[in-house]
Amino acid sequence: MTNDKNAKLNARIKTIFEDSARVKNAIANDQNAIETLRNMADISAKSIKNGGKIMLCGNGGSAGDAQHITAELLVRLRPDCTRAALPAITLAMDTSTITACSNDFSYEQIFERPLRALSKPGDVLIGISTSGNSKNVIQAMKAAIELGVVVIGFLGKDGGPALEHCDHVFIPTGTTDTGRIQESHITAGHALVEMIEENLGMGKISV
């Protein structure tokens, strides 16, 4: 019984890796997706060149992705690419800010409030939602549009209601699985950071 159960679990692990590779391979062969990510990097780099910054937000694993990408921008991603820190901030802020906003206003405003305080026209917001249904991410997107902030969406499935509030959007195709979408989001985030570096002349590609 134990051996049979282990075999089934092993097969499931194998399938998870295979599915992740399949989704990423589909993206790698989707010229529109590649062009979209490069365009997002161009826009982000232009914002930074003009004194702007990148703001990111998401819930749960997507909050972790927002913090992860922020760290890569503030510090660095590639160990052989030493460069100046790039201006980025995650709107999934400290627990005091999150709980105060949730208690005094609503959880739906936890990203909107800091965005309104910290943003300026020409900044970039990257809203991450695997379903496209996250109300607090959508609230931040709406506020960003109002304030002249460019909205980039890292979404999933059919994009959900968040889709209509994005200037530019990346959606992994061929999957509705939250795990596979998140894995594609963080790979896309790494690609975005590298291309921002290249666009700012901080990378290694000679063109």
Image (tube, rainbow, N blue to C red):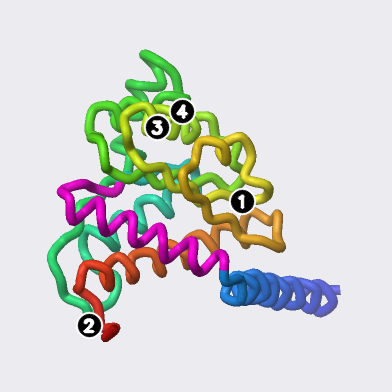
Q: Where is residue 194 in the image (x, y as percent from the top left)?
A: 33, 71
Residue at 59 percent of width and 41 percent of height = 132
> Which kind of residue does numbered mark 1 sit on?
Gly
The local crowd at label 3, few if under 14, some if 14 to 19, many if 20 or more residues have their Cα within 10 Å, is some
Q: Is mark 4 on a helix, strand or loop?
A: helix
Which of the image's four quarters has the C terminus?
bottom left
Residue 117 position, x and y percent, is 23, 27
The quadrant of the image that shows the N terminus is bottom right
- In this orientation, which residue lies closer to the viewer: 69 or 86? 86
For the residue marked with disc 3, what is the amino acid? Ile
Q: How far apart are marks 3 and 1 (CA)?
A: 21 Å
Q: Of 112 and 110, which appears nearest the observer?
A: 112
Label 4–label 3 contact, CB within 8 A: no
| Amino acid type, residue under disc 4 in the picture | Gln
Q: Earlier in the sequence, mark 4 or mark 1?
A: 4
Residue 148 rendering spot, x and y as whole percentages: 32, 34
- Foreground tag (4 vs 3): 3
The structure residue drawn at horizontal position 45% and vertical position 24%, both measured from the top left corner, is 107
Lower sequence index among marks 4 and 3? 4
First reached walking from the N terminus: tag 1 or tag 2 = 2
Mark 3 or 1, nearer chain start: 3
Q: What stretch is highlighted in magenta?
A: 32-54
